[in-house]
Amino acid sequence: DYDPAIEIYTRYLSQFGDSAGGPEAARRLAKAYYEKQEFQKARDAFNFLLERYPADEQKALVLHSRALCEIQLGDKPIALQTLRRIQQQYPDYEPEKIEKLIRFAGTE
């Protein structure tokens, strides 16, 4: 059950979002929504993470996860843009996986 985790991470972010643990809490919140298959909420949480913590050390992973949400939501053109961004900005990040997802997102 992810609901208690979602509540804890949401509360933590509202109280301590500027702390060093903020990015990790935001990642865990987004992942909890993803695992619940609440893909729109997960995408929103990944977007929050990207906006609030632009220097996050796991930015490529966050973009990858957001692209997976976009695919699940049927928004393949946006997913394709996100995946191309990963290729351009983080060429060493999971290149085979990203290329596979690009091929998938590029199909109708």
Image: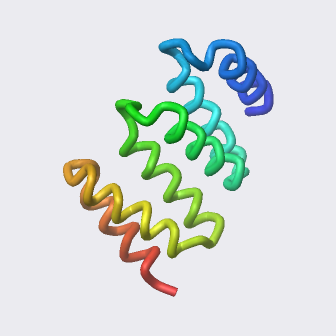
Q: Nearer the viewer, residue 101 or 52?
A: 52
Does 82 sit left or right of 17 as displayed?
Answer: left
- Residue, far left: 92
Quadrant of the snapshot with the N terminus: top right
Residue 9 versus residue 45 in the image, above or below: above
In this rendering, the answer to whether 68 lies above or below 99 is above
Residue at (33, 59) in percent of width and height: 97
The image shows residue 13 at horizontal and vertical percentages of: 66, 22
Based on the displayed image, in which of its 4 quarters is residue 81 positioned? Answer: bottom left
**In the displayed structure, does residue 89 sit left or right of residue 16?**
left
Q: Residue 101 location in percent, x, y?
A: 40, 67
29 relative to 46, above or below: above
Left or right of 11, for residue 64: left
Q: Quadrant of residue 3?
A: top right
Residue shown at the point (73%, 30%) measured from the top left: 6
Residue 89, image x, y percentages: 27, 52
Rendering quarter of residue 74: bottom right
Q: Identify the residue at image location x=46%, y=84%.
A: 107
Residue 93 located left or right of residue 13 = left
Residue 80: x %, y % from top left: 43, 70
Seen from the viewer's position, the closer of residues 50 and 68 is: 50
| Residue visible at 52% across and 87% down in the picture | 108
**Furthest residue toward bottom:** 108
